[in-house]
Amino acid sequence: MLPTRRWAALAGVACFFAVYAVVLDEPTPLFAACGLAAWLVVAQVDAVGTMRAVDRDLSASVSVEPTSVYVDDRAAVTLTASLSEAVDAPVEVELVAPPSVNAPERTRRTVAFDPGETAGSVTCSIEFPVAGRIAFDEVEVEIEDRAGFFTETLTLDADARCLVESPAPDGIHVGRGGELVGASFGDHSSDQTGPGLVPHETRQYLPGDTLSQIDWKTTARMDHPYIREFESESDYLLSLVVDCGSNMNRGPNGRTMLSYAREVALGLIDAADSHGDPVSAQFVGDAGTTWEFGPSSSSNAYQTIRRRLLSIEPTARSRRPVGTSRPVAPEEARKRSRLLEGADSAFASTLRPYLSDGESYVSRVSDRPVFDAVKSACSRSDRQDHLVLITDDSARVETYEAVVVASKRSSQTSVFLTPTTFFDDAAGGAGDTAGVVAFEEFRKRLERLPNVTAYEVAPKSAMNLAADHATTAE
């Protein structure tokens, strides 16, 4: 219990009267000093009783809604306090915010009891900038006696928790036409020749070798434990091309198209690591390749690519600045050209040469970063390879032509596409129906190319919503 400034002022006056009485040798000021001192003692006794009553009768609880959020999200934290019996003194109950959160000012997270009140609550919005399990385990109570001479601060226990997770894709759907893939992508399919294990040599058992490596026939013959070592019978190069352009930044923080693409790429690297496959990687930004590695099959290579995948961010510049148009495929140009047949306007005369210029189309597509990266990856491969392109569906002409090149030059090509419609805020989480249909048509068009498999990569919740909408429409 601590005295307030009011107590200090009154005590100072009492001391003044006492000194004044001694100096002047007058009893009257001494009586005044004694009266003030008695008043302070009575007030202190009353304050002790009030504070003990509050300590006995006050209860407080804290709740957080929701109890699980992502970094930089907000949650509503509610402090509820009650007194079993009213007291005639002001009481303030404050929510103690952990140092790792951004909390509002004290008045917005404090329940204030006026004399006679017995219950109160306050709700405030708190931001969580740091990941982890955040605990709200203390409530601070400040009590002031009714005369205003003393204050006391108590601490009550609370038990509220909030799990703050780093933003990350939740429920990744990797499938074809809405159907989840049955096997882990990146594994070798049974109808293709992949890396197998063939006997290499035998050697004596050494501490640290596992029992599964023991060659029991040789051990029985030599009367000593022997180990059979194996080696990979073939190399199966995984050529990974990941689009890190600015368009991959669509979606909520931590759950962007690049976030989902990253999870797929990490799964592919894990599969290559488990098989001992050599890997190469190219990360492509708006202006071209931003990072290139491999091919290599060392354990350090897999870790290097993993670390780089976890650190990549989409490029900041817009992929298509104002004034830069998309290339138009020849068949689309011919379709548009037929619409101009018979037209003799100046507009038609000006437009017709551009629609018939196939060389311009080839030149403009070949200058695109994803197309150039795929062509470069294919040209480096001199063995059985699996080219994997991870991108979105915004630049469909460029993507299609890149996959055409890959289908001709690679043993196997896999394309993982993040549908733009599922990450467009204007369309909602399930995407618009027209966008979903257009994406599926594009995916099937890619799969019609030889040795090509195309997958959609999207939030599982968005795919479920899209399926529900399609069922409702039927």
Image: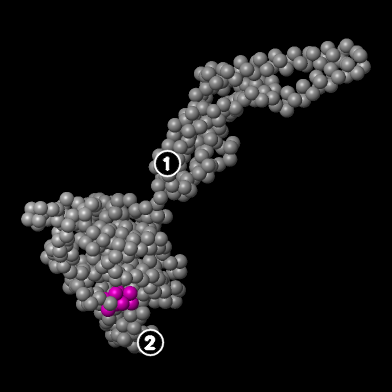
Residue 178: percent from left, percent from top: 22, 57
Which residue shows up at 39% across the image and 68% down it? 245
Three-letter residue code for mark 1: Arg
Which residue shows up at 44% across the image and 34% down it? 160
Residue 372: percent from left, percent from top: 33, 77
- Discs 1/2, front: 1
Q: Which mark is residue 350?
A: 2
Q: Find disc 1 in the rendering and name its residue.
A: 133
The relative height of residue 12 versus residue 67 in the rendered view (above or below) is above
The relative height of residue 211 versus residue 34 in the rendered view (above or below) is below
In this rendering, would 302 be left or right of 176?
A: right
Magenta residues (range): 372-379
In this rendering, would 11 be left or right of 73?
A: right
Three-letter residue code for mark 2: Thr
Q: Looking at the picture, tell me which residue is in the foreground, 146 or 157.
A: 157
Residue 401: percent from left, percent from top: 27, 76
Residue 158: percent from left, percent from top: 47, 30
Q: Residue furthest right?
A: 24
Which colour assignment does the render follow? one colour
